[in-house]
Image (spheres, rainbow, N blue to C red):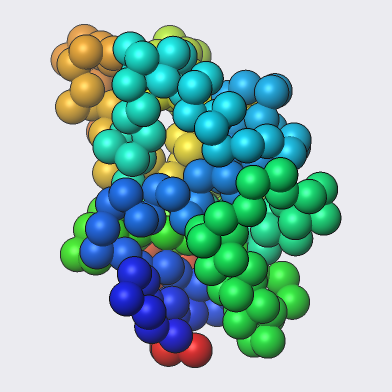
Amino acid sequence: MKTANYTLKEIKPNIFGLQFQDRYDLCMHFLRYQEFYESSSPKFRNKSFTILSFMRWYSKKYGDNSFTYPSDWNGFNIPSYVIEQVFNNAIPDRNIYDHEMLNIYRHCKKSSQNFYLIGYLKNNKTTLNHEIAHGFYYLNNDYKSIMKSLVKSIPKDILLAINSWLKIKGYTPKVYIDETQAYLSTGMSFLNDETHFYLNKKLTNKLLLLSKEFVEIFNKDNKGLQGSKAI
């Protein structure tokens, strides 16, 4: 399925990808649904809310009074039930993005009753793989079990540093394990974020060694499943 704004494909079994060329369009399509699913604020998580109320809160919390959401995020991931729940809870200010998300939901539902929807920018392979890792974690119980065990094996001082970085970035604690496995499997952004994250050389080297196990598990699942197909 292709429109002027995005292309929709089933990129892995039951994992559907929305590929955008424009970062603003990507973020505004997913904003309401991603924040309903895992917002760092209980004001929005599992709640019906207006986009303007979220923009005001986000601007003051993270943007120094500017709405930086479209420049802060470049990938999204939600289970299919989230879209259904958002619409069931009623949307007070439905807009064109909600119209498109409902169409996308209905389109994917024809192929799979339980699917995972991810959003990413064209040619951003690292983010694509990161979001696929979230899909594996949600859909594959064996993958989830292995990754949870690996995260729990990370030394406490390193794990606390990673969690601190995730908190600063706006993640809610309920997704820390999932985010940790996704980052360690596909690209450790926090090692390059000198503003908010610091590990000394010894701990960094230790984490790099640990990450090899995450990468190996992800690559095994990623290569073992069929590639993309248009729907």
Residue at screen point 44% across, 49% down: 28
Examine the rendering and report whether any part of residue 178 can be seen: no
- Left or right for 24, reference 180: left
Residue at screen point 22% across, 22% down: 193
Toward the right, the furthest residue is 88
Examine the rendering and report whether any part of residue 180 can be seen: yes
Residue at screen point 67% across, 63% down: 80
Look at the picture and state if 108 lies above or below 220. below
Q: Position of residue 43 (x, y in %)?
A: 69, 23
Residue at screen point 71% across, 48% down: 91
Which one is nearer the viewer's eye here, 19 or 94? 94
Query: Split into 4 quadrants, where in the image is the N terminus?
Result: bottom left
Look at the picture and state if 105 lies above or below 31. below
Look at the picture and state if 70 lies above or below 88. above
Q: Quadrant of residue 222?
A: bottom left
Q: Position of residue 34 (x, y in %)?
A: 56, 45
- Left or right for 104, reference 226: right
Q: Position of residue 185 (x, y in %)?
A: 37, 48
Q: Quadrant of residue 113?
A: bottom right
Look at the picture and state if 4 lies above or below 132. below
